């Protein structure tokens, strides 16, 4: 009787079987044992692909276990029962809804496992980055309400909508993690999560670059992620790392042609956004805002560190960003380019555009001051120098007049974006006249007083403006989380403690310097930069008290 089913050997090899007895022809030729099943085998096993994936997962978990075990032994600490789960110390219960545990958050893994274990959206938990949706929502809320003013480039409602979508349409995990890390750094109860979230964001961004020859990482979302990573690193005092991360973001943006001009109706040529499916004016405006936030960071990095700028302004043709109202509502708004605004009569600008102009002027002023010294030690009579000096003076006046009435002082003190612009303008004035004042006060030329007197007046007014801004602010701690504003406070305090005659009483100057030092010390509880600058000023004040 011919068997009903193929023999087991042919079935495993997926070959045809002639069901001959006692052996089929194929088994006879190959010398295999040939046996026939009595009934059809029920498929109770798992598919080979599933088994392979489970084997890989087991291997990765074992490697993570070993990594945590080594870290625990090296630090002399006991390993937790969840070491293989890459757990974090739990958040204080006060920041959790209903006192629930935040679950586990992946920590930065070693280089041997990072690329395998982190594959952007695929590795993300669907119940929130911190393992608890309310905590994740709270960190996003803190970012958009407290920290978004520093880089206002992400459309809030669209971002929050996309976070709730399926993983294919969500923002990449590197962007989600760094948004939450930035928000957590401002929240009193979520601060323990800030650094681990940043580490995970950077690991995801690097893993995306290594995946599929880096094609996944070339979109707007990854440009934004690297910029936020650079800003986070700068706030933590990791300046070398921040400079490299910023350069990474700028080069990616240039490869995506974000610096090129696009009309408001040219949405079909937009680069990939990285999440969502919209291709409209809001996405175009996101591209513009992202580019100009990069431009501001590039200019300020040079002004505070003397590292060469990466962006060449003459090669930038992108229109300046539109107003916040137009961006949030999605109503297209025509704007000019930077070159037209700098060299033309058009001064109607949004707040972000004003920040771009202020950063540009600050950069040019610092560059001018750095090039002031010549072989003979001074170039006070250099016509080219004074010509550029006068141009910057006029552009500063135009910039101040372009600030909308509602954002001028004292009304603008409630807006962190407005405060930053005013501080940057006063720092530009200080940087423009301070070298001239110091040179003239130490010179022996007959026109020294002619040069020094107006320069001292300008420096004194700029110092007084910055001191009054911070004395009048309700939320000075948030302002001093920005390294540029901490740098401004430190610079002003040093001018107050110097022997320069800026038209203020000595007691008033010392009192203002002490106020600025106390403000930095208070902000230093959450800002390493502010803490370091506060300690430097404390030593200066102690030396001054010792001399007196």
Image: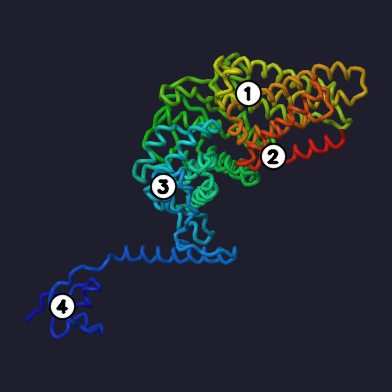
How far is mark 4 from mark 3, CA to CA? 58 Å
Residue receiving disc 2 = 307
Q: CA distance from mark 3 to mark 1?
A: 38 Å
Say which of 116 and 60 sits in front.
60
Q: Give the labeled residue for mark 3.
A: 99
Mark 2 vs mark 4, CA separation in Å: 76 Å
User: Can residue 449 be spotted in the picture?
Assistant: yes
In this rendering, which labeled residue sits more in front, label 1 or label 2? 1
| Marked residue nearer the N-terminal end (1 or 2) | 2
Marks 1 and 4 in Cβ contact (< 8 Å): no
Do the numbered discs 4 and 3 sit on residues whose CB atoms are within 8 Å? no
Q: Residues within 10 Å of mark 2 (few under 14, many from 20)?
A: few
Query: Where is residue 162, by image quadrant?
Result: top left
Of labels 3 and 1, the one closer to you: 3
Looking at marks 1 and 4 on the same chain, the residue that comes earlier in the sequence is marked by 4
Outermost left residue: 1
Q: Is residue 367 at all visible to an observer of this figure? A: no
The reply, left or right, for residue 517 in relation to residue 269 is: right
For marks 4 and 3, the one nearer the N-term is 4
Q: Position of residue 82 (x, y in %)?
A: 45, 61
Instruction: Say whether residue 496 is left or right of residue 144.
Output: right
At x 62% / y 34%, what residue is drawn?
A: 480
Compared to 126, does 390 lie above or below?
A: above
**Residue beneath label 4, please?**
37
- How far is mark 3 from mark 2, CA to CA? 47 Å
Q: Nearer the viewer, mark 1 or mark 4?
A: 1
């Amino acid at each position: 009787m011919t068997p009903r089913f193929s023999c087991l050997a042919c079935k495993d090899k997926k070959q045809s079987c002639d069901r001959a007895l006692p052996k089929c022809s194929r088994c006879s030729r190959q010398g295999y044992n040939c046996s026939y099943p009595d009934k059809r085998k029920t498929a109770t096993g798992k598919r080979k692909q599933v088994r392979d994936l489970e084997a890989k997962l087991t291997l990765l978990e074992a490697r993570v276990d070993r990594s945590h075990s080594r870290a625990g032994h090296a630090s002399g600490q006991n390993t937790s029962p969840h070491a293989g789960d890459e757990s974090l110390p739990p958040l204080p219960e006060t920041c959790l809804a209903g006192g629930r545990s935040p679950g586990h958050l992946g920590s930065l893994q070693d280089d041997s496992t990072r690329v395998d274990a982190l594959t952007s959206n695929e590795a993300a938990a669907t119940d929130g980055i911190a393992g608890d949706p309310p905590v994740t929502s709270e960190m996003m809320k803190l970012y958009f309400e407290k920290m978004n003013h520093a880089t206002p480039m992400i459309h809030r409602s669209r971002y929050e909508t996309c976070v709730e979508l399926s993983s294919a349409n969500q923002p990449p995990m590197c962007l989600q993690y760094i948004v939450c890390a930035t928000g957590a750094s401002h929240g009193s109860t979520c601060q323990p999560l800030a650094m681990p979230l940043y580490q995970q964001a950077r690991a995801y961004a690097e893993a995306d670059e290594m995946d599929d020859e880096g094609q996944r990482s070339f979109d707007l979302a990854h440009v934004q992620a690297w910029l936020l990573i650079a800003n986070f690193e700068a706030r933590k005092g990791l300046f070398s790392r921040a400079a490299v991360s910023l350069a990474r973001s700028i080069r990616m943006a240039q490869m995506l042609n974000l610096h090129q001009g696009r009309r408001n109706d040219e949405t079909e040529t937009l680069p990939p956004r990285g999440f969502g499916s919209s291709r409209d004016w809001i996405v175009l405006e996101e591209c513009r805002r992202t580019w100009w936030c990069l431009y501001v960071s590039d200019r300020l990095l040079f002004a505070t560190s003397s590292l060469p700028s990466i962006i060449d302004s003459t090669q930038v043709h992108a229109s300046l960003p539109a107003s916040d109202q137009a961006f949030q509502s999605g109503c297209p708004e025509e704007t000019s380019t930077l070159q037209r605004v700098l060299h033309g009569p058009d001064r109607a600008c949004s707040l972000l555009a004003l920040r771009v102009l202020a950063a540009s002027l600050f950069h040019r002023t610092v560059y001018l001051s750095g090039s002031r010294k010549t072989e003979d030690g001074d170039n006070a009579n250099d016509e080219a120098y004074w010509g550029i000096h006068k141009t910057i003076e006029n552009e500063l006046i135009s910039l101040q007049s372009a600030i909308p009435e509602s954002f001028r002082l004292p009304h603008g003190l409630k807006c962190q974006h407005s405060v930053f612009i005013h501080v940057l303008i006063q720092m530009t004035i200080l940087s423009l006249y301070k070298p001239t004042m110091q040179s003239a006060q130490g010179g022996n030329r007959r026109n020294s007083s002619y040069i020094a007197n107006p320069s001292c007046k300008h420096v004194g007014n700029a110092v007084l403006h910055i001191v009054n801004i911070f004395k009048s602010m309700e939320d000075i701690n948030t302002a001093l989380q920005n390294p540029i504003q901490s740098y401004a406070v430190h610079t002003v305090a040093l001018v107050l403690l110097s022997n320069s005659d800026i038209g203020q009483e000595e007691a008033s100057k010392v009192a203002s310097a002490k106020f600025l030092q106390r403000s930095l010390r208070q902000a230093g509880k959450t800002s390493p930069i502010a803490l370091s600058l506060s300690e430097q000023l404390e030593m200066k004040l102690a030396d001054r008290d010792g001399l007196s």
